[in-house]
Amino acid sequence: MENSDSRLNGLEHIQELLSSKNLRVCVVGVGRIGLPTALSFAKSGLPTIGVDINADLVTRINSNDYPLKDEPGYDVIFNQVVTNKKFHASTKIEDVVPNSEVILLSLPTPMDKNNIPDYSALKSVGAKLGELLEPGSLVVVESTIEPGFVENELVKIIEDGNKHLVAGKNFSIGVCPETANPGEIMLDFTHLPRLVGAIDEKTTKIIMEIYEYVFPVELIPMPDCKTANAVKLTTNVFRDLNIAFVNQLALLFEKLGIDISVVLDAAKRKYNFQVHYPGPGVGGPCLPVNSYQMLNSAKQFDSNMLSLVKTGREVNESMPDHVIDLIIDGLKDAKKEISSSTILLLGISYKPEVKDIQLTPAEKIVEKLKEHGAKIKIYDPFFKSVNVFDIQTENNIEQALTNVDSIVLVTAHKEFYDLKPSYIASKIQMPVIIDTKRIFDTDDAKKSKLIFRSLGTGKF
């Protein structure tokens, strides 16, 4: 590569590359976050290539088949940049990285079966970067990681792959943690502030210069990588804990005969109350994982540190059990046993309007129902006529409603807001409805004489 030693040697050079649109960008990992990120860079006019080990995904992208049907807005950008050959994907990291000035890492950081963060994807790619990076390259980690992972592990992995590479001397590294909400990435990428941290101030400024060119949002400089990652984890652990708090309130209010929705609606009017809502559990690749990442960081100092976070996890992970209790209680009023009943789950995605079942509480509900011997049906508009959790899902709501004893609303997809309790009552004899997201009209449910359970309200 020509002039590799002079690349990224200052803001003036970056500005020159940006203004001429010759700054070559490689995004490693083009999934839920990585693909919109790559498309954003390509749309800005910078030569951008996506890299992924998923050959089928790469083929879809290069065939102009937009893979994120539930991510609105980026489909238009995708069609523009792929059709105009401004973006493509590859499985060959060895071809792309040496010909890129900037390498963005948007790789998954899941948990293992023991709830320990799994950084194997980042470590594997880091080892390859050690072999492939040209001097002067810039690595930016967007993946959500524990504070200190870059400084304590990733830098060493890269340097060990090439004795001539030294972070801060002939290659740079920093972080810009993604903050996008699946299903709303276009909105978040154009409105939410981003955090930038690096191994030195110069690199932080360079990263900010690049991201200012691509994203019309506030960029907040952090003193280092670990601080930026700590902020990212703090915001999500805050949510996980507050959801756990209202979940516990929901359990209490059911026994007290208090409607939690009335409580929360009034409480949120106070200036310093940030409302969160109860539900059947917390899923997805972020909140549960982020809490365990924080716990993993804490245990190196004290196994009891952040005990509140641990308790919050336990509360949220127990909510599927409470859903089962509500089902059993409702069926008891209908003089039915769960072991001889057919249960319809409405929605299995971990959140509304997203085709994603990562760590969804629906999976635990299915497992518990199987343990009780119940027959299970599933209808989710994003998972029609496919096998999920070893169950063949239904193709439409009318078909799903036939021959069931209980309906459990798990995910509040938009389609379900139009589903009236009175309509359900007309389809099913003596139906039992469990509303874990509180979207059904309770007045309509009462008039329809349903056996109805709503999380945080109790029975009527």
Image: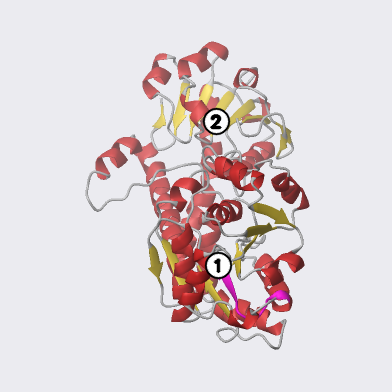
Q: Give the residue displayed 69% in from the left and 34% down from the top.
A: 373
Q: Position of residue 239 (x, y in %)?
A: 42, 54
Q: Position of residue 387 (x, y in %)?
A: 73, 35
Mark 2 residue crowding within 10 angstroms, few (<14) / some (14–19) / many (20+): many
Q: Position of residue 299 (x, y in %)?
A: 53, 74
Q: Is residue 133 magenta?
A: yes
Task: Name the element at disc 1.
Answer: loop
Instruction: Report whether residue 364 is seen.
Output: no
Segment tinted magenta in the rendering? 132-141
Q: Residue furthest top?
A: 426
Depth check, front residue: 275 or 191: 191
Type of amino acid under label 1? Ile
Q: Residue furthest left?
A: 270
Find residue 145 and name its label: 1
Depth check, front residue: 118 or 135: 135
Q: Give the residue displayed 55% in from the left and 30% down from the top.
A: 408
Depth check, front residue: 11 or 200: 11
Q: Position of residue 253 (x, y in %)?
A: 36, 40
Q: Earlier in the sequence, mark 2 or mark 1?
A: 1
From mark 2 to mark 1, how far is it between C-alphas?
35 Å
Q: Is residue 187 magenta?
A: no
Find residue 408 and name its label: 2
User: Left or right: 260 with respect to 190?
Assistant: left
Depth check, front residue: 42 or 149: 42
Q: Residue furthest front?
A: 20
User: Left or right: 236 with respect to 345?
Assistant: left
Question: Up-down: is 18 above or below 135?
Answer: above
